[in-house]
Amino acid sequence: MAQVVGQDPQTVGYIPERSYLWHFIQQKEIKIQIVESANGQKVPHIIAVPSWVRSRNMQLYKVGLDLGNNGPKAAMFDSNGRIVVNHMQAVVKAVQDLAAGEMGTTYEELILQPKPKPQDENTAVDTAENESVLTAIKNKLTGQKEEYEEISPGKIWIDQQAVDNDGVSLSKGTTRARLSDPRYAQFLMFTIANLFEKAGYPSGDYDVLVAPGMPNEEMVETATGSQLDEETQKALSSALCTKRWRIRITDPYGRSKQFNFKVADLAPGPQSYAGFYAWQFRPDGQPAQTIINEILLADLGANDLHELGIRLKFQEKVINGEKRYDVAVSATRERKGNGIILAIMQPFAKRLKRQYGLEELDDAIAQQAFFKREITVGGFREDVSALVEAVKAEEGAKVITDVFKGPARPRSFYMLEGGGNVLLREDLVEKLKSLRRTPKTYLLMGAQHASPLNAVGLLAILDQMCRYGQ
């Protein structure tokens, strides 16, 4: 068994060696073996796990996208097979001209429009519609092609840059509710563009295959497994897949990259299950561990606390002299309570507003005040440590109770994931100690890895589906 700490000292517990999660935490390149024919012989080669899959004559780049209420998290492979992730706070602000200081990093969605043509002074055109019709007829008769240009409606700050400039949080709630705001789909594409830039990909045209992680309550059970409910699937496809997105990122030094994306298809899956998948499976499609048969996974998310009870059945077989395993997975899912935004952040924000007489307080500012333990009011920094501790003591205790309520599960391995896992770390550790749990019987994700875990799992599921059809 492997005790893995890696680069994040707060990630504690058992992580099976060579699993997707192990590669991610260790920041190791994922290598796979392929067999090619050469001179009538089959020759094995070791290559980096492909970041893309060939489909319908398209090169589709694989992206895991967790649509968390606390901001999307995304994951993909770089060209060397390393897992790259990001987590963007869903906060936006139209860029303003600054009298002094750096502009920071800006994002733009570029709109493709026909180039205006110089018009003869003697030519009268009644309407823009008539002009468009006349232009189309002229082009058809002369064989000329319409010329287009990219127009920017304006630059946007996102994530921390937007928070620092008094940006506005995008709405939370169901996926359909969030997609009703056109800024949300645009923000998801900004997130994917940021991921491509972070992974070292150059400017250019990219077709992408996205595995969005959906809230558990938006998934429905069918004879073939969990499926996204039909109306949400339509809303997501309509928002992301109906056009080519042109995203330009400009850094503080004025250097730009432009990514032109076409979301070719979506492969949605439940958020919570994805984290387990990254922990359980290796890139070669085999289980990373065959010792543990029962796992209790508590996902302390932004809006909800969900529990998954997972049972594994391993069947050993020998293929061409090599030992392999088939894995049968069964799972139950239950909502146990509210997530950290509803259970902790909202009570904290209410007290903060009352204590300092604030009429308005954006969600992102409240969360920043909670984690930094200070807020700026009237130009002065105010220490809110006492308020943070009071809310954690009162409201956090209720969340801990919800996590562990129900019958004891001495046979089960505990996986604790989600943002609440970081927020309530000390209390969770104390509770596990009281249950006489040692680190080899549980996994507590650290701050660096907890948020993107489901995105990594979604990427792992998508990778297996593309390479093995499973």
Image (cartoon, rainbow, N blue to C red):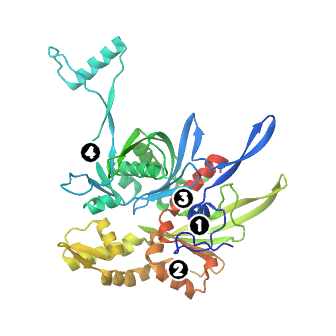
- Between the residue at mark 4 and the residue at mark 1, the CA separation in whole angstroms equals 47 Å
Horizontal and vertical percent for residue 432?
A: 55, 83
Count neighbours of disc 2 (C-alpha within 10 A) and say few if under 14, some if 14 to 19, many if 20 or more.
some
First in residue order: circle 3 vs circle 2: 2
Residue type, numbered disc 2: Phe
Q: Earlier in the sequence, mark 2 or mark 4?
A: 4
Q: Give the residue at mark 1.
A: 332
Structural crowding at the residue carrying mark 3, measured as other residues with C-alpha within 10 Å and reported as few (<14), some (14–19) or many (≥20): many
Assess whether mark 3 and mark 4 are in contact (beta carbons under 8 angstroms): no
| Label tally | 4
Tell me: residue 282, above or below residue 372: above
Q: Viewer-nearest of labels 4 and 1? A: 4
Which mark, by number, is residue 319?
A: none
- Measure the C-alpha gap from mark 2 to mark 1: 16 Å
Question: Mark 2 — residue?
Answer: 404
Q: For this rendering, which residue is in front, 205 or 273?
A: 205
Query: N-terminal of the two: label 2 or label 1?
Result: 1
Query: Circle 2 sits in a helix, a strand or a loop, which is it?
Result: helix
Residue ID at (34%, 84%): 390
Q: Name which residue lies at 28% across and 47% down.
A: 155
